[in-house]
Image (cartoon, grey):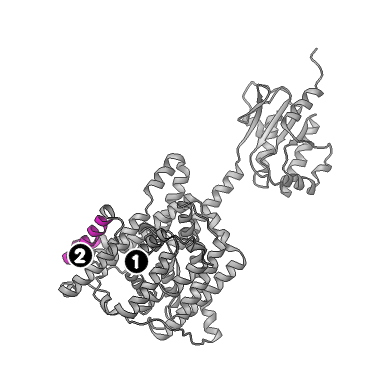
Amino acid sequence: MFESLRPFRWKDTLRDARAGLALAAMNIPQVLGYTRIAGMPVVTGLYTLLAPLAAFAVLGSSRYLVVSADSATAAILSGGLAGMAPMASPQWVTLAGYVALLTGAFLLLGRLLRMGFIADFLSQTVLIGFLTGVGFQVGIAVMGETLGLPVHSHSTLGQLLEVLHQLHNLHLPVLLVSAAVMGLVVTFKALWPRLPGALIAVAGTTAASAAWNLSAHGVPTIGAVAGGLPHAHLRLLPWSQIAQLLPIAGSCAIMVVTQSAATARAYALRHEQRLDENRDLIGLSVANLASALSGSFVVNGSPTQTAMVETAGGTSQKSQLVTALLVAGVLLFLTPTLRYLPQNVLGVLVLLVAIHLVDVRGLRALHRESPAECAVALITAAAVVGIGVEAGILLAMALSLLRIVRHSYRPHTGVIHLENGNAWRAAPVSAGEVTEPGLVLYRFGSALFYANANRFAEELLLLSGTQHAETQLHNTPGRQPPRVLWLIVDAEAITQIDYSAARVIAQLNLQLSKNGMVLGFARMSPDALSDFQRHHLAECTPALRLFDRLHDVVSEFRACQPPPA
């Protein structure tokens, strides 16, 4: 407990307090907007910034992740509950509470099954693309609100098209307020980065709205917000109705695990911090339980809100606890003034965070160093924008796994040469390539399994000079490769041999032995050697040769050769 809050240093605590103040200023109007997506009463958005935020701060390991209302899970919730009750009704609130409760149970089950490993499949390449995609998605989502244009589509591309088709209907007062807020926040960030520019912008526009009655001039405000702290209530539902909520909760849990893991991992890598994904699952589980018991809805690790903390200079979950205290104060004393806050101010603040999420520098570095990985990042970003965060993350994980499979399917191979009696170098595999006359040291750079076993056999047959349909294609016309006596595999990188590969090795040994050749392995790892014995390769006839070192292979081979005439 409290790991994400330590160490307690006054210097960092004061900086975290300022970040918590800025997070509250930006996040309060944002979570109020998420209640519209979820179909919940407006005040329940503020409830997600109380008990859930504090629960994760106490039990989670991520120092940056902000756990509260989120657009992705809000959309899943509203879509799943559609038709089961009227939106924002007491029955709807009860159903949403049970979805949060069941989501917490699924997350706890995920912790028991140690599902935190999912984050291990999110490479830095994927995370750059994920956060960039989220930046575009969120920026497009709030573009209409920022410009004062009505947007009804739920898809990112649909929202963009609606905004573009309505540009001729721009409302000047809304545009002026948005431009003023953006200019103020950018100016404060450039000239006085220690001051909470977002908070000043929110306070200033709220005061201006109240004084000049901006709503009468066509600048919409967020309207009345109920005050007071939440109280625990969750009335009983019949089991048949709870069963209907299980698929919705399961979808929310998948979203929470993937999005929270991706976000927490991205910021842990960026700041070189330790992350315990399984402990985060406990924090997320208890946060959703707290949300259910306080009359709110599913909470999630939010990329945009986490970016807010980092942008404001926060370094630990102390920022989030400060935000929770400020929200409690707002609920008790300031809800009457929130009604004057212009809606487009929220859009501007979120748009600025979205711009910060687009990692142009990271994409440039990827393109410079690894164009293929840059393509994966761009595909991930496009998937998040085009088909949503959940599907985008799953596609990104699939692409990462396919890259791993491809590397294993076509690993680096080569023929090893000894230079100056000591240094080793590898040459590409080709017909006639030998380490020295009569000897081939062949390196295979991956675990040996069913998918790459045929390539392993084909390259060894090619090096052996054995003539068959496949190797004829590789042989250089008119070139007769020297006779090979020993084919020894450098197995240092072979960590595993499965059943199919073992059968290929046994068959290959028979085929080579018929041509008077010796097949062997050098530098086998303990795991590979265990597989070697388990699959009875040690019992092959003729016996497969095993060596500890490559130098041992060369020495013994030379000792077995007759002296030159």
Q: Residue furthest top?
A: 565
Say whether residue 176 is magenta.
yes
Mark 2, other Cα within 10 Å: few <14 / some 14–19 / many ≥20: many
**Vertical side of 429 occupied by 260: above or below:** below
Residue 248 in view: no
Principal SS element in the magenta part? Answer: helix
Residue 139, located in which quarter of the rendered image? bottom left
Residue 355 at x, y percent in the picture:
33, 55
Q: Earlier in the sequence, mark 2 or mark 1?
A: 1
Q: Is residue 28 left or right of residue 109?
A: left
User: Could you tell me which quadrant the N terminus lies in?
Assistant: bottom right
Tell me the kind of residue under disc 2. Val
In this picture, which residue range is highlighted in magenta? 165-188
For the residues marked 2 and 1, what is the alpha-carbon distance in whole angstroms? 22 Å
- Front tag of 2 and 1: 1
Residue 202 at x, y percent in the picture:
26, 67
Residue 532 at x, y percent in the picture:
77, 45
**Vertical side of 348 occupied by 399: above or below:** above
User: Could you tell me which quadrant the C terminus lies in?
Assistant: top right
Mark 1, other Cα within 10 Å: few <14 / some 14–19 / many ≥20: many
Q: Secondary structure at mark 1?
A: helix
Residue depicted at x 38% and y 50%: 359
Residue depicted at x 35% and y 55%: 356
Mark 1 lies on residue: 21
Residue 508, located in which quarter of the rendered image? top right
Mark 2 lies on residue: 177
Q: Is residue 10 left or right of residue 341?
A: right
Tell me the kind of residue under disc 1. Leu
Q: Secondary structure at mark 2?
A: helix
Q: Is residue 526 left or right of residue 13?
A: right
